């Protein structure tokens, strides 16, 4: 059980390690200071119907109730330890899972933890202003839920840094509160986390695409031979599921509403659709293209010796590593990757160990495809002849084999000039952003009311109705 009498709720027996407890209690006010500066605008006095983790038991792990966000019980929760757990892959496969950091992997593990940890506050910073243009109280509550849980994910990583990495870890924990998304001098570590999230459509796309990258990274870290990292990532995944739900249903409700309006007025032209104050499907496709492509960059280079080392050393596994039926060492295996050679896209086999980033990304793409087919079903059901598609993997990439190339969504290799002529057919233009933001100039705060551009959800939160007062402003 989680100890809620402590200043910092936890299930890691923090009270028994006074030095660690004091170090974290010292970091806590700095975290709250960061939340105050970079958390959701003007939200400190709101009472929000939030879930809080109260146990790591999969049945009934969360409790719902009104909370002021600065009083949210951010804590440290790890999946219970399995004393028989082993290192399940790589050169040290079969050893008991490590309860302390092996000295030779110290800097690699620290880098992995810091990189993961950095994404958590980054997304809160990116979403900071969105509460002021929320389409409903239901949606406002959902974004706040995502924000407080990203805050908790930061706690999860900071706990590991403090507990296992000594002074270096404490310095890294401070740096996590000092970087800022999009800052010219001290930006967040990864590109997608420095992009603005300027409107609610971008937010829903972000939680569908980019939080799902988070899921896949957490899944591969949940396989780590370093047991505390594995256990903390397992528990984070429980919370992450909701973030992707917010994204998938959010975009789905936008599609639903657009289709309703198209049918009601018997219109298909995007300009006519916009006149009705909803988001045309063509613009949705462009947002999708943008968020998909910047998220693929998060998987890193297609060919990566770092990824190979992380795997061979037992630090970071594959998606669902223990469910795979190969040798879990991969010294003989190969994996296909794509690249541009002589103006054409070709596929070739490379050693599987160096292709692990590409493989994780491909696993991710499969899940994206099934999400997309659920969105397309909404359009089909409305009888509208339009399909959302995912662009070619090489489209609009800044990292990996396609960086520096100009690839169309259909996978043609283009000249720079031809790319420039077409890019705003494929990516949101300044006018697209302006239009979408024009729909979101104010917030909708009456319980049960929804902005014109989005359909209500089928269900509310925790069996409450959609018209529940999810946020009280005071
Ligand atoms: Fe997270
Ligand atoms: Fe998330």
Image: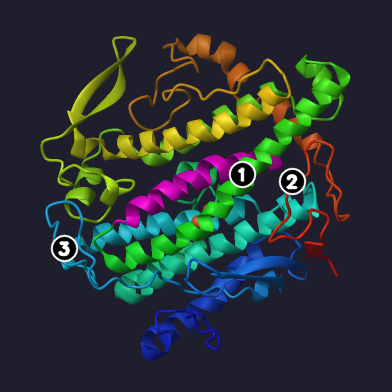
Magenta span of residues: 198-223
Residue at position x 30%, y 73% in the image: 164
Question: Which numbered disc flags the more N-terminal residue, 1 or 3?
Answer: 3
Which callout, 1 or 3, points to the residue nearer the camera? Answer: 1
Q: Which residue is mark 2?
A: 457
Residue 238 image point, x, y percent: 49, 59
Q: Which residue is mark 3?
A: 104
* Above or below: residue 385 compared with residue 109: above
Question: Which numbered disc flags the more N-terminal residue, 3 or 2?
Answer: 3
Q: Element under label 2?
A: loop
Q: Which sits in the foreground, 61 or 247?
A: 61
Could you say which quadrant of the image residue 147 lies in?
bottom right
Task: Report whether residue 97 is seen.
Answer: yes
Mark 3 and mark 2: Cα distance apart in space:
50 Å
Q: Which sits in the foreground, 457 or 23?
A: 457
Of the 4 image quadrants, the one containing the C terminus is bottom right
Q: Which sits in the foreground, 128 or 179?
A: 128
Residue 329 image point, x, y percent: 15, 46
Residue 392 image point, x, y percent: 45, 21
* Above or below: residue 329 compared with residue 82: above
- What secondary structure is the stretch in magenta mostly built from? helix
Question: Which numbered disc flags the more N-terminal residue, 2 or 1?
Answer: 1
């Amino acid at each position: 059980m989680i100890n809620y009498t402590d200043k910092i709720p936890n299930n890691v027996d923090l009270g028994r390690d006074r030095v660690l407890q004091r170090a974290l209690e010292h970091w806590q006010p700095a975290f709250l200071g960061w939340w105050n500066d970079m958390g959701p605008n003007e939200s400190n006095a709101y009472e929000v119907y939030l879930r809080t983790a109260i146990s790591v038991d999969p049945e009934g792990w969360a409790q719902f109730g009104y909370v002021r966000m600065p009083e949210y019980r951010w804590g440290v929760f790890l999946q219970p330890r399995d004393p028989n757990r082993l290192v399940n892959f790589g050169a040290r496969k079969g050893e008991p899972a490590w309860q302390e950091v092996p000295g030779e992997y110290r800097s690699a593990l620290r880098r992995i933890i810091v990189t993961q940890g950095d994404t958590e506050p980054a997304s809160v910073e990116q979403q900071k202003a969105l509460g002021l243009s929320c389409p409903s109280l239901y949606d406002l509550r959902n974004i706040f839920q995502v924000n407080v849980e990203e805050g908790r994910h930061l706690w999860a990583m900071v706990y590991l840094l403090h507990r296992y990495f000594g002074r270096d870890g404490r310095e890294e924990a401070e740096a996590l509160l000092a970087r800022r998304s999009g800052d010219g001098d001290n930006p967040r570590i990864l590109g997608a986390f420095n992009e603005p999230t300027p409107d609610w459509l971008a937010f829903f796309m972000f939680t569908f695409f980019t939080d799902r990258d988070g899921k896949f990274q957490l899944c591969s870290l949940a396989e780590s031979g370093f047991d505390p990292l594995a256990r903390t990532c397992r528990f984070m995944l429980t919370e992450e599921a909701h973030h992707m739900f917010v994204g998938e249903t959010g975009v789905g409700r936008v599609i639903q509403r657009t289709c309703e309006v198209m049918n009601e007025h018997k219109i298909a032209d995007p300009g006519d659709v916009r006149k009705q104050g909803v988001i045309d499907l063509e613009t949705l496709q462009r947002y999708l293209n943008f968020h998909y492509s910047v998220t693929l960059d998060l998987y890193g280079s297609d060919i990566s010796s770092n990824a190979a080392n992380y795997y061979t050393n037992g630090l970071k596994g594959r998606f669902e590593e223990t469910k795979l039926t190969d040798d879990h060492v991969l010294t003989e295996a190969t994996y296909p990757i794509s690249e541009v050679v002589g103006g054409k896209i070709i596929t070739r086999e490379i050693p599987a160990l160096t292709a692990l980033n590409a493989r994780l990304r491909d696993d991710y793409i499969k899940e994206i495809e099934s999400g997309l087919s659920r969105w397309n079903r909404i359009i089909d059901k409305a009888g509208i002849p339009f399909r959302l598609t995912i662009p070619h993997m090489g489209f609009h990439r800044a990292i990996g084999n396609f960086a520096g190339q100009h690839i169309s969504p259909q996978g043609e290799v283009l000249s720079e000039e031809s790319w420039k002529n077409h890019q705003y057919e494929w990516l949101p233009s300044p006018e697209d952003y302006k239009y979408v933001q024009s729909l979101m100039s104010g917030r909708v705060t009456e319980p049960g009311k929804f902005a014109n551009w989005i359909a209500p959800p089928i269900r509310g939160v925790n069996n409450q109705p959609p018209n529940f007062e999810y946020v009280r402003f005071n």
